[in-house]
Image: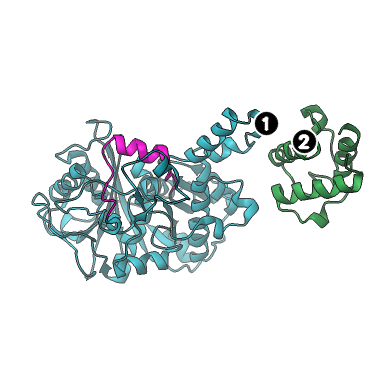
Chain colours: A cyan, B green
Amino acid sequence: MSTVEVVVTGLGATTPLGGDVASTWEALLAGRSGVRRIDDDEHEWVTRHDLPVKIAAPLAVSPTEVIPRVQARRLDRCEQVALVAAKEAWAHAGAPEVEPERLAVVIGTGIGGAITLLDQDDLLEGPGLRKVSPLTVPMLMPNGPAAWVGLELGARGGVHAPVSACASGAEAMAWAMRLLQAGEVDVVVAGGAEACITGITVAGFVQARTLSQRNDDPERASRPFDVSRDGFVLGEGSGVMVLERAEFAAARGATVHGRLAGFGITSDAYHITGPDPEGTGQARAITRSIEHAGVAASDVTHVNCHATSTVAGDVGETRAVRKALGEHPVLTAPKSAMGHLVGAAGAVEGIVTLLSISEGIVPATLNLDELDSGVELDVVTGEPRKMEITAAVNDSFGFGGHNVALTFLP
Amino acid sequence: MADNTEILTGLAEIVEEVAGIDTAEVSAEKSFVDDLDIDSLSMVEIAVQAEDKFGVKIPDDQLAELKTVGDAVDYIAKNQ
């Protein structure tokens, strides 16, 4: 059981549903989708390469509309989104007065600045060396989002960037909790960032047969747990939380929005992309997480699922939930509305989990017309469901066999 | 061939584009580092754009010697 209590005092996000936490949450409750066609001028590569996937979940608000021009031109898009979310979270937390040496940043990403890498390689191959930006390396490095946020906030207690594919954002929360519980710092700004909707990522996921090709009905394409699901929808965005030692937050009179009470991190060692169909490693992550939090399986009334809308993944996850928690938790899958934010997914969905607890309402899973018979659990569909949540688990899994479960309490 | 006033105007536009500093602030006596707070990465970008705009070559050892905006204007005027 956790010895040092960790509280959440600030939330920030930019997602396919909205440019901040409030608009994202409102869209989730309203059942809106952030998925749309992308075979347009901005994404001309879709048509140029005749890609079979013509849909994605791009940001609702471009970060360049929010970040000053000169700062934006020094940042890869994944760094821009991290900065947008972090600034919102920091302001939401009331800009804590903390010694710089007692402030850390942990922001993960799955892919990092690959768009910069591609653009700059085009310049090297075309006009040549002179045209390659001196900012190429800081823009493409996967620790870039964390480093820029650290610079912005003056964090000198360490800047970290976990990279575990689609579990990166959740793993960042876990690392933050470790730092706080080890007594290394008082405040951690933690989250995930991803912005890599481009030709090669879509092509790579297409060749791995993981993306939905429901191009004729974009808003219905992401359908976790539905029998006719055919893959995930690639999204982009960032989610960031301000986490503090409870004592530190109390001393400064901060408003507490909930608690990150436990985490569990395991690895499958089963296959490089495919999840263990029995969900053994995922179940262990959930169990470790609730044990760390000091809650019983029966206390966990809600699970915010990783469920990406892939054929293999969704059912495997429900096996893990049943194994670790039983049949009582109420499930939802936010990726049905906002697509898969890859390295940001765990962080944004952690925020959704926390809001579900504090608001007492679980957003519905969209497009769930016919539940896969392998699920055998209660998934919220149609309208959001009002319920009192005593404890909630948020799952995140990633290519590489990464499993991360977070336990949140009111 | 641009005269010194035209070079200063052109250089100020580049500095504004790269570093976001108002063109009116970019005057001959200003130090790139100490007055305009331009870092070494941005200086490389400014040099490459100045080379293209004025048809000059600014080797790295010369770039390091261009402390003020005026130094850069003079160098470009002599070498264009």
- In this rendering, would A313 be left or right of B66? left
Kindly indicate whether the residues beneath marks 2 and 1 are on one polypeptide chain: no
Total numbered labels: 2
Query: Is A202 part of what is drawn in magenta?
Result: yes
Could you tell me residue A64's position as x and y percent? 55, 56
Check contact, mark 2 vs mark 1: CB within 8 A. yes
Chain letter of disc 2 in the image: B
CA neighbours of label 1 inside 10 A, class few (<14), some (14 to 19), many (20+): few
For mark 1, give the secondary structure: helix
CA neighbours of label 2 inside 10 A, class few (<14), some (14 to 19), many (20+): some
Q: Which residues are magenta?
A: A194-216
The quarter of the picture where residue A260 lies is: bottom left
Say which residue label 2 marks.
B51
Q: Which amino acid type corresponds to the residue marked 1 in the rendered image?
A: Arg
User: Which residue does the image show at 36% across and 51% down from the upper left?
Assistant: A56
Q: Nearer the viewer, residue A117 or A271?
A: A117
Q: Is residue A163 visible?
A: no
Question: Which disc is residue A88 wearing?
Answer: none
Say which residue label 1 marks.
A130
| B21 is higher (above) or lower (below) than A21 | above
For mark 2, give the secondary structure: helix
Query: Is A230 part of what is drawn in magenta?
Result: no
User: Which residue does the image show at 78% across and 49% down from the upper left?
Assistant: B36
